[in-house]
Amino acid sequence: MNLFRPISKLYYRALGVVLIFSIGCQQRQTSPERVSDEDFKQLPKIDVHAHYKYPRAYLPDFFKRWNMKAMLVDVAIEQGDSIVKSFDSYLAHYNQLPELFYLCTTFTAHGIENADYADTIIAQLEQDIAHGARMVKVWKNFGMVTKDSKGNFIQINDPRLNPIWDFLAKNKITVLAHIADPEQAWRPLEDPNNPHYNYYKNNPQYHAYNFPEMPSYETILAARDQWIKNNPELKIIAAHILSMSNNINAVSERLDAYPNLSVELGARFGDLAMQDSEKVKQFFYQYQDRILFGTDYGTSQAEEEKSAEALVEEAESLEERYRLLFDYLVKKDSMELRKQQTKGLGLSKEVLEKVFSTNYLTFLADSN
């Protein structure tokens, strides 16, 4: 009996040490792997939605420091009967720095009533792809801008577009689709703190609330959903979180319904910041294979048109804006993002790798 008590004490002390060690190991095993600032800087990154139309002397160093590449995305702007495209400018920038950039072309429904419309567009896309384009963007011209001769808005699921989708699916070319705008476009501008307030204040031509003849938000989204459903072999990245960034439940429903669909984050971080951080974090974990990093950042003037001071300010602003988005995804700190008080998501290294590069590289690996 005298020997039992010392042995018992030693046993329970040892057992306690084992339990503490075991719990510590379990905590380390179940806690997501965090990324240090330096490790994150070296993490490969692809901004799949950028508009660096004009070169900058500071850009190569900027992208190399962050170990980042960017997709140069052309946008076709309709001005009356003319179409303003910038593919040649993007192509020149791409050819100058092919190690830093990918290339994305575009088209519109302008001329859709012509018998040779689809053939003409396909010929243009073939040429652009031959020059290096890896994606094709469709913009909110579909649904919100382009009309036929009877005044009807052309929707993205118009059957006259089907030969184009078949061509892209056959050639495994991904479509970057910005269809509709945020729901705020169809609402009055009442809240200056809304992430989209300044955009529609400065671009009233896209503030659908002012144009009652424009199809409703719901009508355009229904056409888009039908288009995705009709083209299961077409790889689609929905720009701006599916134009439903204020409602990740609705985004989740579409991702569950359409296996060919992914989303990118460009210019919609403010909408994410308005929602519960833990809920948004779970969205990233649940759909980690189908979310891609994008910003919608770019250059809209030639370098020689800006002063040296303006270029320094532009470079500093770009650094600050990217860093803020990075911090939101990587850290858990409280922060302000697009006038929204929020908390960083603190995503694991595995998820960050997928969102920042692996998911898009998978698209590339699957293409011709």
Image (tube, grey):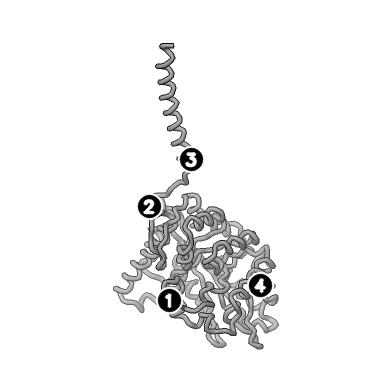
Between tags 2 and 4, which lies in front? 2
Q: Nearer the viewer, residue 335 or 320?
A: 335
User: Between marks 2 and 4, how big is the CA–CA gap?
Assistant: 44 Å
Residue linked to disc 2: 37
Residue linked to disc 3: 29
User: Between marks 1 and 2, how big is the CA–CA gap?
Assistant: 32 Å
Q: Nearer the viewer, residue 41 or 210?
A: 210
Q: In terms of sequence position, does the residue under pointer 2 or pointer 4 come before the other? A: 2
Residue shown at the point (50%, 58%) measured from the top left: 280
Taking the image as shown, residue 62 lies to the left or right of residue 368, namely: left
Q: Residue furthest front?
A: 1
Taking the image as shown, residue 349 lies to the left or right of residue 106, namely: left
- Name the secondary structure under disc 1: helix
Assess whether mark 1 and mark 4 are in contact (beta carbons under 8 angstroms): no
Residue linked to disc 4: 164
The quadrant in which residue 198 appears is bottom left
Residue shown at the point (42%, 57%) measured from the top left: 344
- Name the secondary structure under disc 3: helix
Q: In terms of sequence position, does the residue under pointer 3 or pointer 4 come before the other? A: 3
Q: Nearer the viewer, residue 361 or 31?
A: 31
Return the x and y of residue 6 as percentages of the image width and height. 40, 16
On-image quarter of the N terminus: top left
Return the x and y of residue 297 as percentages of the image width and height. 44, 69
Return the x and y of residue 99 as percentages of the image width and height. 46, 61
